[in-house]
Amino acid sequence: MSANSFHHLKEASVQIVDQLIDLLKKLNDEQYASLLPVLHGNSIGKHMRHVLEFYEALFSSLAVGSINYDKRKRDLLLETSTQEAIQQIEKIKTLLSGLHTDSTLLLRASFLANEEDEVEIVSSVSRELAYNVEHAVHHMAIMQIALNAHLPEIDLPSHFGLAVSTQKHLQQQVGKA
């Protein structure tokens, strides 16, 4: 992978987590932690925690050369405190800025609920950064649905929770109109 591509993935991650900080600054802890019917009793905070813990799992894996998102630590404070979530994002941004080279990682995961065995897949830091960006966008889309349904007064940019490919497609459609 070229250095430019690696930088591109780091920058995409920074843009994603900056959007998450912007959202967190608009919510109080009660709004953030409220269990919402549209999320089947989950909260914005639970989705945020999930996203942040995947990034944290990636950075924790660098020293050992393998990653297992299933075995990530789950910090419940991240789903109830906007300040804790912001602090975690700032830590992620610092770690991203210190990331300078791609390297091989071994991804370990269990994809069958009735099996204990894990599969091992050769991956890389860049591939896992790409995965984390897409994973975050997916959860941001879910957060956007919840916000529209339960907190419509929270104003987010129109691109929040939209994949870059979708944003580009929509821009092309506007250009054709």
Image: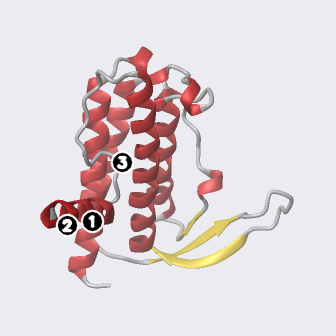
- Mark 2–mark 3 distance (CA, rounded to whole Å): 18 Å
- Mark 1–mark 2 distance (CA, rounded to whole Å): 5 Å
Which residue type does callout 3 highlight? Gly
**Residue 26 image label:** none
Q: Quadrant of the C terminus?
A: bottom left
- Say which residue label 3 marks: 161
Image quadrant of residue 48? top left
Say which label, 3 or 1, has the lower sequence index: 3
**Considering depth in this image, is 17 or 108 the residue closer to the camera?**
17
Q: Is residue 151 left or right of residue 53?
A: left
Q: Residue at x 23, y 70 (%)?
A: 7
Percent position (x, y) of residue 106? 57, 74
Which residue type does callout 1 highlight? His
- Furthest residue to the top? 30
Identify the secondary structure beneath mark 2: helix
Whether label 1 touches label 2, CB < 8 Å: yes
Say which label, 2 or 3, has the lower sequence index: 3
**Residue 172 image label:** 2
- Say which residue label 1 marks: 169
Q: Is residue 63 left or right of residue 10?
A: right
